Amino acid sequence: MSVLIVTGTDTGVGKTVVTAALAALAAARGASVAVVKPAQTGVGPDEPGDLQEIGRLAGVTDLHEGARFPDPLSPAAAARVSGLPPVQLPAAAGLVGELAHGRDLVLVEGAGGLLVRFDEEGNTLADLARWLGAAVVVTARAGLGTLNHTALTLEALAHRGVQLAGVVVGSWPAEPDLAERCNLCDLETLAARPLAGALPAGAGALPAAEFLLAARAGLSPAFGGTFDAATFRETHQKGTTP
Ligand SMILES: Nc1ncnc2c1ncn2[C@@H]1O[C@H](COP(=O)(O)OP(=O)(O)OP(=O)(O)O)[C@@H](O)[C@H]1O
Ligand SMILES: C[C@H](N)[C@H](N)CCCCCC(=O)O
Ligand SMILES: [Mg+2]
């Protein structure tokens, strides 16, 4: 039994796709896997949310959405605007703990970046990770601007004593520009370890069988994949040094 928390350096960086890739690899090796989204915002009652996307991509059905708010805001702000009660993050931690007893892996996808508030008390995904003693996967953008966002996220994790499970690039472009290629090396410097993966741009639109192949190639052996950071870096580093 283990719990992995999936956060990102921002909203829209590919957390859902990374969570789906982690779930797909776990399921493919026969592990029982549950996925929890404590708060889904920006999606109406009858629309598919991140969990439905994960279910479609990874073929997992053990999906748990804590609360849903229609406005595309932080969970705390979305609850305030809607007049609905905010998510109780301690209760979400309880649910994750319970699920973990009967599963090999429980994945938790946050909302937006690490320090986005879930309630008026200011509880965040970092608090959830701390309560559960769970490590955090940080999904990062590939391009210019990601170094500062990633450094801030890693510093916030370290400040709270939360363990980093790895940095994964959520969407690696087919034709990376100079900043994206340089960032491979610099993201590793920030994390003080090799990249834990890079999923190809467009992976989120693949059918499940092809998504599994992309997940395998795009995530490191620590997550059941074959991604090798050194080979990936070498492939893309042309022109990044004199
Ligand atoms: N590797 C990828 N392949 C295809 N599409 C991607 C990939 N990464 C991200 N996207 C697309 O980018 C958008 C944002 O990605 P995603 O929904 O995964 O972000 P997120 O970090 O989960 O954001 P949120 O905070 O809303 O949960 C989506 O439309 C998604 O389909
Ligand atoms: C609506 C969006 N897709 C996410 N569900 C929520 C993102 C909240 C981000 C808040 C912020 O950092 O300003
Ligand atoms: Mg998402």
Image (cartoon, rainbow, N blue to C red):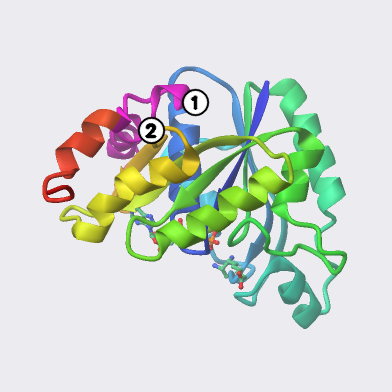
Q: Residue at x 58, y 69 (%)?
A: 43
Q: Is residue 97 magenta?
A: no
Residue type beneath disc 2? Leu
- Where does the magenta region start and end? 207-229
- Per the rendering, the mark at residue 219 is 2
Position of 215 with respect to 54 (left or right) is left
- Per the rendering, the mark at residue 185 is none
Residue 102 screen position, x and y as percent = 73, 22
Q: Secondary structure at mark 2?
A: loop
Q: For ligand 1, which image quadrant applies?
A: bottom left
Counting residues from the N terminus, which is met first, the one under dot 2 or under dot 1? 1
Q: Residue at x 27, y 37 (%)?
A: 210
Mark 1 residue crowding within 10 angstroms, few (<14) / some (14–19) / many (20+): many
Residue 31 screen position, x and y as percent = 54, 20
Residue 133 screen position, x and y as percent = 75, 32
Q: Residue at x 74, y 56 (%)?
A: 124
Residue 155 screen position, x and y as percent = 61, 50
